[in-house]
Amino acid sequence: MRFCPAPSGWLHVGSVRAALYNFLHARHHGGSFLFRIEDTDAARATEDSMRSMIEALAWVGLDWDEGPLVAADGTLGERGAHGPYRQSERAALYAEVTRRLEALGATYPDLRTADELEAWRASHRSGAGQGPPVVKASRFEHDPDDLARLQTEGRPASLRLRTPESGTVVVEDLVRGEVRWDWDQISDPVIRRSDGSATYPLANSADDVAQGVSIICRGEDLLSVTPRQVLLHGLLIGPDPEDGSVALIDAAIAQVGLPPRDPAWQSPEAFAHLPMVVGADRKKLSKRHGSVSIQEFRRQGFLPETLRNYLALLGWAPGDGRERLDDDELIASFDLAGVGRSAAAFDVDKLTAFNGERIRELPADELAERLVPYLDGTEGDEVLLADPPSAEQRALLHGLVPLVQERMQRLDEVQRYAPAFLRDEVELDPASVAKILPKAGSVEAIEAAAEVLAEVDWTVPAIEQALRGLSGQLGIGFGKVAQPVRVAVTGSSVSPPLFESIELLGRERSLARLAAALPVARQARAELG
RNA sequence: GGCCCGGUAGUGCAGUGGUCCAGCACCCCAGCCUUUCAAGCUGGUAACGCGGGUUCGAACCCCGUCCGGGCUACCA
């Protein structure tokens, strides 16, 4: 199995799902999971985007058996017996393979300029407003005279693979069953650019064969590109033009000194084309749909285990109705053959609900630790903790977790609750002030709360008893007492449970906040009327 | 235009000829609980794209049609 994205930098959720399926299928069947970076298009690849991608994949928790790595000190490395795993470092192999393919007569040169190519296409269009014609050697290849003339001009040549002029290709696809094409509909792909570099079709096929990839699992967008790949696979494991007793790929590998293939392994066995992941509007996933990169989900406080679970369900289900699955369960029940065939819409609401459930199941201490990056500025701008947190901050955080755990859906939401507890001063939310404090009894409730809290034992039950007593004493419902006090103490009409919040805050800070809110409440009352 | 792929509630899945007037989950709505917000519990709304066949019987098989998507690059 292998996952081989182009290094755009952002790791798209669709890509992550493909990687996940690769990972799960490999683990389920005891195979290995290979991660390779397809950076044959030099212009698109940067070192940073590559690093970001590798780190993101590692963060999701998809451990690969072979592929590039980012070491703790930030340097790029790799692991595995069939490296290197960046195509930019395998150019020699592609050149050697291409040379042998030429010797085989499986290719032909194309000396056309971009303009000439366009002109050819225009003149071969079947009608107005129609798509480009199929490139076939029979009508595209230069005749010998032209070729000789063009070559003496010293024009650079690209190289195309000669595909069969007729007949049918049948591909066995694990998710779609048999898919077939007529060769006369398939264009001869460029396998070597005129600047000498290899294109994706060649590099991808050569690597899959050289690295012993047995199942090629990727997005449906690559389905129609499969025929030329099976053709290439056949050529690569076929006899070498110079030494017919070995396979072409093995001769090329030996020539450039790359690690040899596993002798027990023959060639790719099967393809698996995954349906696309689309947005809620059924359109292609893009920035319009909010976050689409895995890095963004991390910043928003989604747990990697949630992502693994949710993404696994995007196009697949275990069949027994379960939805909440941990990694072991996923690995045990996942099979590519069970993957659906229609496009799956990415539903952030469901992901979010899933995440909330998982957060609630986390042991409180673990949650506290996982919250730290969202409070110390690592993820997000809010800086409420020192790095590392002080003992006092840690204690407050651990005390806060039970109060907020069941009301969080994402880790970054802690940034909403924490300031009231981790800062000495509280900022009174204007909307809450306007909504609650002008009401009858607010001023009295705050005054009375300050009085009883000054004396009471500092335990949750005692605090509760004292505050509930105020309700009878002032002759108003408890809600009328609790809301003003809540605004005064936490700064907002929406907060974790009151008594626990007050207890966590401590007597000193609670009383200070009540005192500070009193004039605000009086003023709000006065303004009203 | 051509080739390929797909189409069960708003969304994700289940369903592979009868037990489906279609099940589960998210969303949404209502109620309960309740110091706010949540969480939890209970209930509810809502779907087999359409048309033909095959069959005693079709969401499931076949054909057509419509709609959506992918590819049609010296991108991957």
Image (spheres, coloured by chain):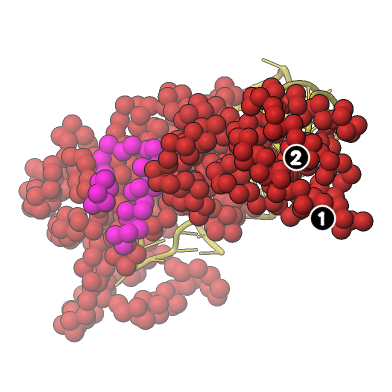
Pick whichever, A379 or A104, lies toward us.
A379
For residue A54, say whether it is visible. Answer: yes
Task: Point out which mark residue A523 bears.
Answer: 1
User: Residue at the bottom extreme?
Assistant: A153
Q: Chain of mark 1?
A: A
- Where disc 1 sits, the SS reads helix
Chain B, chosen colour in render:
yellow
- Reading the image, the residue beneath label 2 is A485
Taking the spot 34% from the left edge, 69% from the top edge, the residue there is A139
Up/down of A401 relative to A432, above or below: above
Residue A478, quarter of the rendered image: top right
In the picture, the quarter occupied by the N terminus of chain A is top left
**Few, some or many C-alpha atoms within 10 Å of disc 1 (few <14, some 14-19, many ≥20)?**
some
The chain displayed red equals: A
For residue A357, say whether it is visible. Answer: no
Pick whichever, A88 or A9, lies toward us.
A9
Kind of residue indicated by mark 1 = Gln
Taking the spot 48% from the left edge, 39% from the top edge, the residue there is A393
Q: Position of residue A375 (x, y in %)?
A: 49, 46
